């Protein structure tokens, strides 16, 4: 905020953190994008247990999720988009929950960090907070910025971050997802998150158009492929 005091009439502001907040193992893919007003509007998370850049390279018999490598590696395999039973027993689901909570905590901490800037610079039309690792992107448009100014920030008592409301989540999963450029995502997972009160509308629940533009390529294509698979619904309490 000290650096920005000398600037007036700022319309677009993009801030890049030196690194992402999430400590993930080497080879793991984890990206998120979140939109906020006074609280979370939506968040989308794309993850994979590992990324294979050459589909023809040798792979181990079992991947990080414990699935055999002879499973279908396309987006529309014979599994009909269903999650294998082993996903629930070998820690696969637990890992995705950890990814989701970690991403939401990172996003809500960034939102809290931006509050003084938003209060001081009332001409802002767009505010983006990203990181050099390409992990996460927080975005706020003019209406969302004004909403935060009007409504008091609901801070979490546990730490310096915005409180996350009760959530409805939709999850899509593919043991192996081969992208058109030859990259294979093992244990590919997409999670779309919205506050429960937003999801009360049937239209809001069924609309997935906002997911298709969340990530740059090739990950935008991965998201589009995953949402064609079977949808699994989860709920999460406010935290």
Image: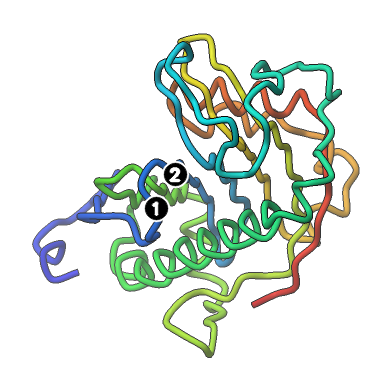
**Along the viewing direction, whichever of 122 and 198 lies nearer the viewer:** 198
Report the residue marked by disc 1: 25
Image quadrant where residue 84 sits: top right
Q: Position of residue 142 (x, y in %)?
A: 46, 49
Placement of 206 over or under 213, stated as above or below: below
Percent across and percent down for residue 206 are 84, 36
Q: Assess whether mark 1 and mark 2 are in contact (beta carbons under 8 angstroms).
A: yes
Quadrant of the snapshot with the N terminus:
bottom left
Considering every residue shown, the one lying at the far bottom of the view is: 157
Q: Is residue 234 above or below residue 111?
A: above
| Nearest the eye: 2 or 132 | 132
Is 117 or 50 nearer to us in this picture? 50
Any mark on residue 104, and which?
A: none
- Asked if 162 appears above or below 43 in the picture, the reply is below
Dot 2: within a 10 Å radius of its alpha carbon, few (fewer than 14), some, or many (20 or more) residues? Answer: some
Crowding near the residue tagged with mark 1, few <14, some 14–19, many ≥20 C-alpha atoms within 10 Å? few
In this image, 72 relative to 160: left or right? right
Q: Is residue 42 left or right of residue 7?
A: right
Residue drawn at 38 percent across, 71 percent down: 115
Determine whether the residue tagged by mark 1 lies in a helix, strand or loop.
loop
Q: Which residue is mark 2?
A: 28
């Amino acid at each position: 905020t000290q650096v920005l005091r000398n600037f007036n009439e700022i319309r677009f502001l993009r801030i890049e953190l030196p690194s992402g907040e999430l400590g993930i193992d080497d080879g793991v893919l984890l990206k998120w994008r979140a939109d906020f007003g006074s609280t979370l509007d939506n968040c989308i998370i794309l993850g994979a247990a590992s990324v294979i850049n050459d589909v023809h390279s040798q792979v181990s018999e079992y991947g990080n999720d414990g699935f055999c490598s002879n499973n279908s590696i396309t987006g529309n395999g014979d599994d009909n988009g269903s999650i294998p039973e082993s996903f629930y027993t070998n820690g696969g689901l637990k890992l995705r929950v950890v990814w989701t909570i970690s991403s939401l905590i990172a996003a809500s901490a960034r939102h809290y960090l931006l509050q003084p800037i938003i209060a001081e610079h009332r001409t802002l039309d767009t505010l983006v907070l990203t990181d050099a690792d390409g992990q996460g992107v927080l975005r706020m448009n003019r209406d969302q910025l004004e909403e935060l100014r009007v409504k008091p920030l609901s801070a979490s008592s546990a730490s310096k971050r915005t409180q996350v409301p009760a959530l409805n989540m939709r999850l899509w999963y593919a043991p192996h997802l081969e992208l058109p450029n030859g990259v294979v995502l093992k244990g590919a997972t997409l999670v779309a998150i919205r506050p429960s009160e937003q999801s009360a509308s049937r239209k809001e629940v069924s609309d997935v158009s906002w997911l298709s533009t969340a990530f740059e390529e090739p990950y935008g294509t991965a998201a589009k492929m995953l949402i064609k698979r079977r949808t699994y619904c989860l709920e999460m309490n406010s935290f």
